[in-house]
Amino acid sequence: MKHLLLAFAILAGPAAFAQSVPATAYEFLTVAELQAQQDGLAKLQFAPAFQGKTEIQLERLPGTISAAKYMGAYRHNMEVVNQQLEAVTAAGWELVHVSSSPVMSGHEFLFRRPKK
């Protein structure tokens, strides 16, 4: 019997005797950047609320005005989005996923942090 247990220990390796580590519980935050040129919609949404905000209005994107005005508004919106993403990470949230918005032009950022 001792030989059988020794053989099992050698074949199974250290993983057979490792203690399981409890999984970390996380809370999640989604930040969605939504922009639609056709109706000028431009906003940043938070779910759940972040620092008491569920939404920040961004500069409306001009529809048929000059390319320079469009690019200026778009650049301004990128700066606002970057400032908010910096604030989220400074508050202890870790970025875990980025995707294109399935609804309209923009991106969705998924953050997590360990539950307190």
Image: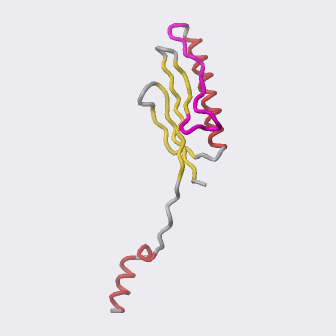
Left or right: 108 as drawn, with respect to 5: right
Of residue 11 and residue 89, the one placed in the foreground of this image is 89
Membership of 116 in magenta stretch: no
Residue extending farthest to the top is 65
Horizontal and vertical percent position of residue 25: 52, 56
The percent coordinates of residue 95 (x first, y second) are 55, 44
Q: From the viewer's perspective, is residue 112 above or below residue 105?
A: below
Is 36 placed above or below 1 here?
above
Residue at 51%, 26% in the rendered image: 34
Q: Position of residue 84 (x, y in %)?
A: 63, 34
Q: Is residue 58 magenta?
A: yes
Q: How many marks?
A: 0
Viewer-side residue, 72 vs 92: 92
The residue depicted at 51 percent of the width and 11 percent of the height is: 63
Colour option used: secondary structure
Q: Is residue 65 above or below residue 29?
A: above
* Residue ID at (53%, 29%): 33
Vertical order, 92 against 56 (above or below): below
- Is residue 10 left or right of 42 when viewed as pictured? left
Q: Report the quarter where the N terminus lies.
A: bottom left
Q: Residue at x 46, y 25 (%)?
A: 105
Q: Which residues are magenta?
A: 46-65
Which of the 4 image quarters holds residue 102? top left
Q: Quadrant of the C terminus?
A: bottom right
**Coordinates of residue 92 in the picture (x, y in percent):** 63, 47
